Amino acid sequence: MTQLDLDPHPPAAGPGTAPQGRVLHLRAAGVSLVLDVPATSLPTVVHWGADLGELSAAALDDLVTAGRTARANNDLDVPQPPRVLPEQSWGWSGRPGLSGHRAGAAWSTRFVPTGVHVEERAEGGRLGLTAADRDAGLTLEVEAELLPSGLLRHRATVTNTAGPGEQPYEVAELALSLPVPPVATELFDLAGRWAKERVPQRRPLTFGSHVRENRRGRTGPDAPLVTALGPAGFGFRHGEVWAVHTAFSGNHRTVVERLSSGATTVSGAELLLPGEVRLATGEQYRTPWVYAAWSAEGLDGVAARFHDHLRSRPHHPRLPRPVVVNTWEAVYFDMDLDRLLELARAAAEVGAERYVLDDGWFRHRRSDDAGLGDWYVDEDVWPQGLHPLVDGVRALGLEFGLWVEPEMVNPDSDLARAHPDWILRGGDRLPPASRQQQVLDLGNPAAYEHVLGRLDAILSEHAISYLKWDHNRDLVEAGSGPVRAPGVHAQTLAVYRLLDELRARHPGVEIESCSSGGLRVDLEVLEHTDRVWASDCIDPLERQDIQRWTTQLLPPELIGSHVGASPSHTTHRSSDLSFRAGTALFASFGIETDLTRMDAGERAELTRWVALYKDVRELLHTGVVVRDDDHDPSYRVHGVVARDGSEALFAVVQTGTPDGSLTGRVRLPGLLPRAEYEVTAQEPGNDPAVRGGRDLPWLATGVRLNGRTLAAAGVTAPAMQPQQLLLLRVRRA
Ligand code: DGJ
């Protein structure tokens, strides 16, 4: 650890506190981050990308010199690089890093470093820098950390240091940014909607701003998730890629900006509503973390950095991800104890390990019209409480989980009748209803304490191992308190606090982040929860794509996926059980259909899939996710390769009808190039009758090929019907 001129939290810039300039080089997992940290201005990212190897101080200085831009006609007399927090006071004409003002003043800053704290680690390291603008009455803290996964993350904190008599400082936006080199000419991110979350989109990177804004008060089905830039045509397995993720579950904004100078920057920020953050003297505002991944090997390389980072967290789930049976699409609101116990017995028979009672168990909740907020077990439906069900489920050897939606309230509830002032609203009017519900103001301490108390009581009274935490509407006109001040910022932080408090009080309880399906999927919510529900759509054809793109950020073990009914309840499309199960397999696996009505044959087949999941979950939940670039749009090939390259499981998925009648080859990427592998069909799911009745000659014997050949030449794909898949087990010979 090196400490330079150090006062980690100086009150303000002043004579004698200025640090010495230096160039900092952090390296981890094939990534270099070079920061020019001058004494008199905020740092500049000189290089974020491929590992540059060991560089001397002189070479680093030369790297800075080599990166200085030439002065063009009509340019500033001394051209300036974009700093981590771009400031207009240095001539930056793009989006400033800090937008804000103090009653119209202090709208443009020039921060001067006051302390630099560098921690160099064997893998990566951290820069903590404090700076001040005495005229503006502000201090700034910048934190940038290169993690052992090679993932970079940064955030900033601004503090109002003006005297007590001064006006508050209103923050409109605070965002650090990263430069992306000119070789990146194409921009990729995700969009989507309910039941079709995370749809990819691409466009050339043109001059101007690509701005993705979210004002839903939750992460959203259409969040960019990962904003990636690279050379035209970059894919899963090729192309250098620079990518960012804004880790926030409230309103947020991700911006890619290309200026006429040619400079391209990417930034992520919380989207603050007007007046939402007004700092009184001594108060501060901290941005969300923004995570950034560079990869030489396309989007799979980016995903691998996110997955490595998530798996390295001390609180990452380490126990095998249990087979879940969820009651929602099995019984909906039919809370009949006998029926639910029968479902639990069927669940135990197929090998399930966790039983989750979904919506409908609490007071007044006979449909989605009423009851949200009344977090008491409904005495009419459950005269003996939930205990007979909880005990019955646990006696079968299953864990018990419970659905809650703590941030919400139905106007038709005892809670809303007793505390109408606890509802977020912009004025005397209520926001437009969505699923007949409104949002509780958790920024209100009384409302917060009430919800915390009820959840704590339920968890204390019952042996509950799991909460499915739902959130089924956008925050619209979310005004808080007597003046109806914008409340999304406070609400989002309150939810994080609530989750943390419950986890502290009930350490064994895992929490799933659900929001109308997959509308709260981000890295910050996963700091407070243990899995996400990827989508309300469990039609496997849709799920193939939803999961394909959710794994761009999250490893399979954090993504909930269930085997549903056929026809699907959301799309009415029919599908074979093998397609449904083979799709859910590559995630945190579960079942969400009325098992008691499944015929014996199907139940036996599902039992085999559950057994396979248990057999392969360690591989799937620790290995490297690989996705082959689609050569034929009617096929998808994806898989997971063990970290040591010793084995892999691939799925060859036929999503549509190929144009040609001859099947082509599919490639199996990501294996050790020189190692020999046996490739065989993995049962179940290899029934030729299911695959369309046609045999594939090589499947009868399997083949032995090395990793290089499997990645480059591949194997012939089976002739299948649309919506069928074949699993291939690959083992090192
Ligand atoms: C939306 C969720 O995504 C579903 O899985 C289910 O829990 C319902 N809410 C219950 O109301």
Image: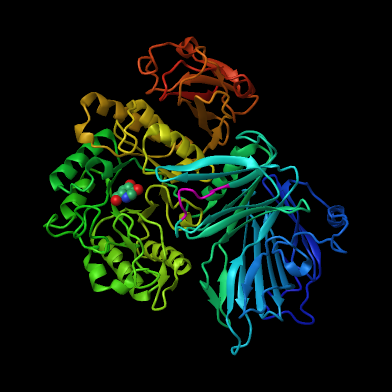
Q: Main secondary structure of the magenta part?
A: loop
Please say whether residue 28 is one of the residues in the magenta stretch. no
The C terminus: image quadrant: top right
Image coordinates of residue 511 in percent, x first then y, are 38, 54
The N terminus: image quadrant: bottom right
- Colour mapping used in the image: rainbow
Position of 709 with respect to 491 (left or right) is: right
**Residue at horizontal 74 percent and vertical 47 percent from the top:** 181
Image coordinates of residue 256 in percent, x first then y, are 65, 52
Position of 699 with respect to 69 (left or right) is: left
Point out the stretch of residues depicted in magenta: 219-226
- The one of 575 and 478 positioned closer to us in this rendering: 478
Image coordinates of residue 361 in percent, x first then y, are 21, 54
- The one of 607 and 81 positioned closer to us in this rendering: 81
**Residue at horizontal 60 percent and vertical 45 percent from the top:** 305
Position of 616 with respect to 266 (left or right) is: left
Please say whether residue 225 is one of the residues in the magenta stretch. yes
Image coordinates of residue 84 in percent, x first then y, are 70, 61
